[in-house]
Image (cartoon, rainbow, N blue to C red):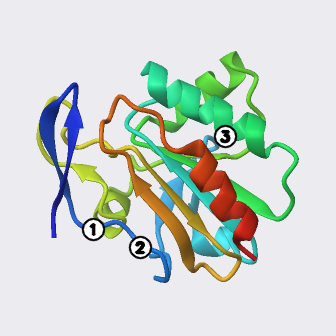
Amino acid sequence: MNQQVTLKGNPVNVRGQMPQSGEALPDFTLTTTDLEDVGLAHFAGKRKLFNIFPSLDTPTCSLSVQRFNRELAEVDNLALIQVSADLPFAHARFCSAEDIAGGQNLSTFRSPSFLANYGLRLDSGPMAGLCARAVVVADSTDQVVYSELVAEIGDEPDYDAALAALKQAA
């Protein structure tokens, strides 16, 4: 099943269906800023908040990374997983420039299957091939407790809803 979002009001197709509340997180392979490939097992036993976005080089994406890092800096037993198609070098540069030390910044560049497995591949429009903007929260057993596909790519996610779901996750 495909979904649709907008970019500046223009329809954009999103291929697949993202994980929904009550479902298990799909496994994945993503690449760290150190060029190491990691998967779901790397975060075993931790609650997870996935902040998924098109590119760090856009203002909204930058704001969401900064905000989630600020809001979740002191939260225990949490994996903050920031995902985009940006190269690992861009993630490292951004985090250094913005003084961001928290979270795990991961790239889909070696594993486009992440976009298929999470149902978040922008399939049309000028950003085709990049990640749709989304948030997925899972408990420590990898069960999804919250997911949001942001309807307008240029909008920020619903931080309050994501953070409330995270507080409820065991």
Q: Position of residue 30 (x, y in %)?
A: 50, 57
x 87%, y 59%: residue: 76
Of marks 1 and 3, which one's residue comes earlier in the chain?
A: 1
Looking at the image, residue 119 lies above or below residue 70: below
Tell me the residue that label 1 is attached to.
17
x 69%, y 19%: residue: 98
Q: Position of residue 67 (x, y in %)?
A: 66, 33
- Determine which of the numbered discs, if any, sits on residue 68 in the image: 3
- Determine which of the numbered discs, if any, sits on residue 64 in the image: none
Q: Categorize mark 1 by other alpha carbons within 10 Å: few (<14), some (14-19), many (20+).
A: some
Q: Name which quarter of the figure residue 64 lies in.
A: top right
| Distance between mark 2 and mark 1 Cα atoms | 8 Å
Task: Please tell me whether mark 2 sits on a helix, a strand or a loop.
Answer: loop
Looking at the image, residue 65 lies above or below residue 42: above
Tell me the residue that label 2 is attached to.
20
Looking at the image, residue 53 lies above or below residue 163: above
Task: Please tell me whether mark 3 sits on a helix, a strand or a loop.
Answer: helix
Amino acid type at circle 3 is: Phe
x 88%, y 47%: residue: 74
Left or right of residue 45: residue 55? left
| Quarter of the image that includes the C terminus | bottom right
Of marks 3 and 2, which one's residue comes earlier in the chain?
A: 2
Amino acid type at circle 2 is: Gln
Q: Position of residue 127 (x, y in %)?
A: 22, 33
Q: Nearer the viewer, residue 35 or 101?
A: 101
